[in-house]
Amino acid sequence: MPEISRKRILFIVENLPSPFDRRVWQEATTLGAAGYDVSIICPKGKGYEAGYEVIDGIRIYRHSLPLEADSALGYLVEYSSALACEFYLACRVLWKHGFDAIHACNPPDTIFLIGGFFRLFGKKFVFDHHDINPELYEAKFGRRGFLYRLMCLLERWTFRTADISIATNESYRKIAIERGGMREEDVYVVRSGPKLDRLKIQEPVPRLRNGRRYLVGYVGVMGEQEGIDLLLAAARRIVHDLGREDVQFGLVGGGTSLEKLKALSRELELEPYVTFTGRVSDADLLDMLNTADVCVNPDVANEMNDKSTMNKIMEYMALGKPIVQFDLTEGRFSAQDASLYARHNDVEDFADKIVQLLDDPEARRRMGEFGHARVANELSWEFEAPKLLAAYEGLFSESPR
């Protein structure tokens, strides 16, 4: 049986493998460096196929998934399979290493079933609120109804099970308190600040411009709710309506909609002007973003995106890049003067803002410098790590609820 000389934390994450999931990995390594014993349960993924390995002292247990879902039925199959694997691996970790707390990272909001089970045996349950799933469901499927109400119920049960909740921003904190019924003192805001030692400013790679003068960069998931279709519509306006054949678009990331978006690019006669890289290494991602003259966040204006902090925004800022995005609450809070803000879901305004920046090198320089300074002095992981440690100090010092 394992020794119990220090507090032991078990992370459970379903949607991305570790260490690819940057927020989870930063949290895990921060806790490890502070003296906690850390294990992670996560899915396998491209480049992360090993069922078990230890990286930087963090034990990682990975499981297979039957599919990468893009429908309601598919999500039911994926999440049910993941939950079974997570429970089995949690029992295995408990026997081999032990744990004092489960740190559950959503989506989905089903991991509370595992957390609630182990709470019966005195284990703590931490809910790390990455996505607001009712709004995510509505954004993906464009409707409410039974499954939406189920998402709300699962969210409420998750909050009720949690000893503490970790919110990525103030909007999520408000949801935890008002919709989840948590006490204010049990909800901690820990933003997904980038680590500047990973996001290094370096020389551009001219070949990524594909022989053109400018490069517009994007990094993120290629999914239904990310607004890539709006970005491609804006690209068509820039290239064909405004005659700007000097602009290349570099889109970094994988996802269930990647092939559909490639087809849309061909349909819009943009194929020579748009590079889809798929999921790539950090080195290739940094090459693309460091080469970009302007970076974009085309997230659709809806309830989910308005309340969510997007990691890509702060990554762009860390690299000193000016940004164009739709005018959303948390996006504006993060970027402030590092971004221009287009009207909600207005493709023409989005395209015009991109061109405005491409034609104004002084504005690009000023906005890039502002964004880099804001991350370096306020928003990087250096400033968020102490908040995570404070949350865990609160978790283990509080009396049982």
Image: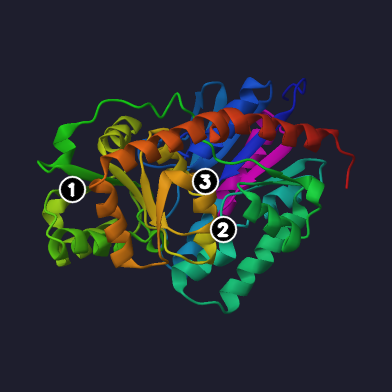
The residues bearing labels 3 and 1 have C-alpha atoms spaced at a distance of 26 Å
Q: Nearer the viewer, residue 245 or 265?
A: 245
Task: Let me know if residue 395 appears in the view.
Answer: yes
Image quarter where the N terminus lies is top right
**Residue type indicated by callout 3:** Ser
* CB under 8 Å between discs 2 and 3: no
**Label 1 crowd bin: few (<14), some (14–19), many (20+), radius 10 Å:** many
Question: Which numbered disc, 1 or 2, marks the residue that appears first in the sequence?
Answer: 1
Q: Position of residue 312 (x, y in %)?
A: 42, 44
Neighbor class of circle 2 (other Cα within 10 Å; few <14, some 14-19, many 20+) is many
Task: Give residue 140's position: percent from left, percent from top.
Answer: 45, 67
Can you tell which mark lies on residue 391?
A: none
Q: Is residue 100 magenta?
A: yes
Circle 1 residue: 248
Where disc 1 sits, the SS reads: strand
Quick check: is 13 in the magenta stretch? no
> The magenta stretch spans which residues?
83-108
Eye-nearest disc, 3 or 1: 3
- Distance between mark 2 and mark 3 Cα atoms: 12 Å
Q: Nearer the viewer, residue 51 or 149?
A: 149
Disc nearer the start of the sequence (3/1): 1
Q: Position of residue 77 (x, y in %)?
A: 49, 62
Among the two numbered marks 2 and 3 on one chain, the one whose residue lies closer to the N terminus: 2
Is 194 rendered above or below residue 249?
A: above
- Asked if labels 2 and 1 touch by Cβ distance under 8 angstroms, the answer is no
Q: Quadrant of residue 182?
A: bottom right
The residue identified by callout 3 is 334
- Measure how far apart labels 1 and 2 are at the Cα level: 30 Å
Mark in the foreground, 2 or 3: 3
* Residue that mark 2 sits on: 307
Q: Amino acid at mark 1?
A: Gln
Disc 3 is placed on an element classified as: helix
